Amino acid sequence: MESRLDGDLEELCPVCGDKVSGYHYGLLTCESCKGFFKRTVQNNKKYICAENQECRIDKTQRKRCPFCRFQKCLHVGMRLEAVRADRMRGGRNKFGPMYKRDRALKQQRKALMQAAGFRKESGPTLVSATQQQDFTFPGGLQPDPILHSSPPTAQNNSMSYQPASLCSLLPSHSLGATLRQCTVFSNWTVKAERNDRMCSLGSAAGLYINSDKLYSSSPQGPGIPPLVMEFLRCDPDEVQLQNKITAQLLQEQTVWNQHGGTSMFSLMCLLADKMLFFMVEWARTSIFFKQLKVSDQMKLLHNSWSELLLLDIISRQVLYGREGSLLLVTGQEVELSDITSNAGPTLVSLVQRGQELVERFFILKVDRQEFACMKFLVLFNPDVIELEDHQFIESVQEQAEGALLEYSLCTSSQYLGRFAHLLLCLSELRSLSVLAEEYLSCKDLSAEVPCNNLLIEMLHAKHSWQ
DNA sequence: CTAGCCTTGACA
DNA sequence: TGTCAAGGCTAG
């Protein structure tokens, strides 16, 4: 009897090497890893590795370390979003066409192998062979350190004035150790503190969502795909971020007093630099990213820093901002007219296009969950050259895109058109970030950008290898 | 908790 | 109506 699955079933489970029983959660796996993945996601299980998070997972040892087993499940591409939040049985999911394509591809490959004279028994297919490598899986679905870290203290902020480099930030776990002395505070107008409004808006927009409660303890669930919940969990809390940056600025104010006030532009550079620092911290502790080698991490960040920075600024305006003003990460507001009144044509254009983008996101009612997904979409750009783990990065981008699409499906009836519109907005974001980098480069050439900071490193790094 | 087998139900 | 990838059940 020659069944359709015979070809597929010859393959080995990419997680443990056991016999494959069919497509489960995105790819061909064995029955036990299917069940393990389902239990882990449905029950929101947290595991801890007793070793150094590099346990070998095979058929005989898969029970030993569920932490590393789950990490391997994610790494080979099992999809969190394929586990149904509503636990509905039967039916088909959106992966149907993907499974079909995969089958066709395997069939094609098999035919090619046979035509080339390979015996079927000569080993696992190309996919299994690469997936059976030994990967190391640092981290995983653990609580995000940045969300639980205490506010910066006088001690850890003032200890070191070394310039921060991306290289030094990535493998490090010490948040305050690389902060450095910067200049400025300035003669710009602070209109209003927004702490109260931020807090109330924050809780309404889901800033304080407890993902455990929302997903696992309610069998019906809120309809938020698990991967979106995970992205949201990685996302820094706006109020904490505001507190951290404000605390740092207050501390550096004494330094500024010694140097005298500087321009609005210098202040913006300082803020951008601080935001970049926390952006690197966000990426470094985020799901998927922390599994990458430092070299790939650096390439991705060098490629996307300006887009991420702009997306962060824009999302702040969409979620909490007021028309006609720019809400800073510190919670303060600057009138846009104050910025553009003395600005050159490039900056005016930047501000205008940025405002238009804010408006488009606002009309689409983009929420914090969607911005969290988009950040991953932007960060995991498989088009970056010379990536070591290109396949994984591509798979993460696909997963982020799938999660965003699925979430749009949950929240909007016109999800396909809306989803397409979101992608168009990201394309405009990209173009805007190019303009912003050009603007900064010009300023840098005329020595107007405060030197010795992460902002400049990013600017130089990107233009040196692209 | 694991993993093999069972039930369900959208889709081709 | 058959397929097959979801979730469910349960002995070990």
Image: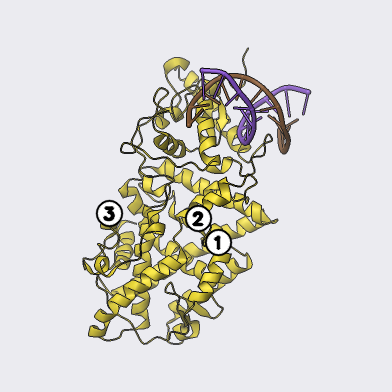
Chain colours: A yellow, B brown, C purple
Q: Residues within 10 Å of mark 2 (few under 14, many from 20)?
A: many
Marks 1/2 in contact by CB < 8 Å: the verdict is: yes
In primary-sequence order, the first of circles 1 and 3 is 3
User: Left or right: A174 with respect to A148?
Assistant: left
Residue A394 coordinates in the image, percent (x, y): 46, 45
Q: Residues within 10 Å of mark 3 (few under 14, many from 20)?
A: few
Name above or below for residue A244 compared with residue A290: below
Q: Nearer the viewer, residue B9 or A215?
A: A215
Q: Residues within 10 Å of mark 1 (few under 14, many from 20)?
A: few
Residue at mark 1 to residue at mark 3: CA–CA distance? 30 Å
Q: Quadrant of residue A96?
A: top right
Disc ID at residue A172:
3
Q: Please, which chain is the residue tagged with disc 3 on?
A: A
Residue A138 coordinates in the image, percent (x, y): 35, 43
- Judged from the image, the secondary structure of the residue bearing numbered disc 3 is loop
Name above or below for residue A275 compared with residue C10: below
- The residue under the point 47% across, 27% down is A13
> Hey, what amino acid is under mark 3?
Ser
Marks 1/3 in contact by CB < 8 Å: the verdict is: no
In primary-sequence order, the first of circles 1 and 2 is 1
